[in-house]
Image (cartoon, rainbow, N blue to C red):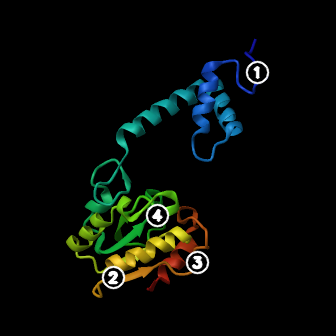
Amino acid sequence: MSRKLNANEGGEFQSPALERLVRSLSRLPGLGRKSATRIALHLIAQKASSEELLISAAEAAEKVTNCSNCGAITEPDPCRICCSDRRDASQLCIVASPVDVLPFEKAGFFPGRYFVLGALLSPLDGVRAGDLPFERLAERVRNDGVTEIILALDASVEGETTALYLQQLLDDGKIKLTRLATGIPVGGALAYTDEVTLQRAFQGRRSF
C-alpha cells in the first residue's frame, strides 16, 4: 500500500522532514513552493535519483571553485583557459558573472581570456565600485600585456553604468576598448543569448 503525502490545513506537509526539504528547495533561484514540492516528491519517490543528487551536490561543493586569476568556474586553479598557451593573452573579455563565460566558450569564436567581475555596479542594490575587483583587473591588464579589452556586459542600466566606469578606469589611449554591438536586446541577460546573436554582436563590437 503506497504512502499518501498530504498537506495539512495550514498548507504545510504533515511530515516535518518533507516540509523542511520543500522549504530548502524553494529558496533556490526560480523555484516557488509548487515547483519545490514537485521536485521534493520526485526525490522521495525516486530513491536512486535522490542519492545521486546528494552525491553530485556534495562533490560539486567540495571541488568546484572560482579561478583565482579570472574568476571563472573551475576545478583546477588557475583554470584551463588561463593556463592555456593557445589563448591570446592580449585580448581580455570582461563579463559580469561566471556563467557569462559559457556561451563564448560554447560558440568557440573568442581566442582570448576572461575576467569575471562577479556583479555589476548597482548603488540601489548596495553594489559599489569598492565591492568589485577593479584594482585586480587593472593589475591584470598591466601584467598580461593586454592590447584589447572587450566589455561583454548585460544590456541593462547596471551594465551601462559598469561599462562607463570601466571606460574611465581603463581607457589610457593605448588599449583598444570595445564593447558588444547591437544584437543583445536591452534588458536581456548575456547568459541566455543564443549563439548566432552573440557572435554577431561580438563581431560588430565598437569602440567607445
Which quadrant is the C terminus positioned in? bottom left
Rendered view: 64 above or below 124: above
Q: Tell me which residue sits at (28%, 66%) in the image.
A: 135
How dense is the environment of label 1, judged by Cα within 10 Å: few (below 14), some, or many (20 and up)?
Answer: few
Q: Amino acid under label 2? A: Asp
- Between 8 and 55, the one lying in front of the other is 8
- Distance from label 1 to label 2 (Cα)? 62 Å
Label 3 amino acid? Gly
Residue denoted by label 1: 8
Where disc 2 sits, the SS reads loop
Answer yes or no: do the residues labelled 4 and 3 have beta carbons within 8 Å? no
- For discs 1 and 3, the disc positioned in front in the rendered view: 1
Which callout, 4 or 3, points at the residue further toward the start of the chain?
Answer: 4
Amino acid, disc 1: Asn
Of tags 4 and 3, which is closer to the observer? 4
Q: Which mark is residue 178?
A: none
Q: Is residue 125 visible?
A: yes
Marks 4/1: CA distance? 43 Å
- The Cα atoms of the two marked residues, 2 and 3, are separated by 24 Å
Q: In whole angstroms, how far apart are the C-alphas of marks 4 and 3?
A: 20 Å
Alpha carbons under labels 2 and 4: distance apart:
19 Å
The percent position of residue 77, horizontal first and vertical second, equals 28, 51
Is the residue under label 1 in contact with that under label 4 (CB below 8 Å)? no
Q: Which residue is mark 3?
A: 183
Circle number at residue 120: 4
Is 84 positioned to the left or the right of 206 in the image? left
List x then y, in percent, for residue 40: 64, 30
Q: Residues within 10 Å of mark 2 (few under 14, many from 20)?
A: few
The reply to whether callout 1 and callout 3 are in contact (CB within 8 Å) is no
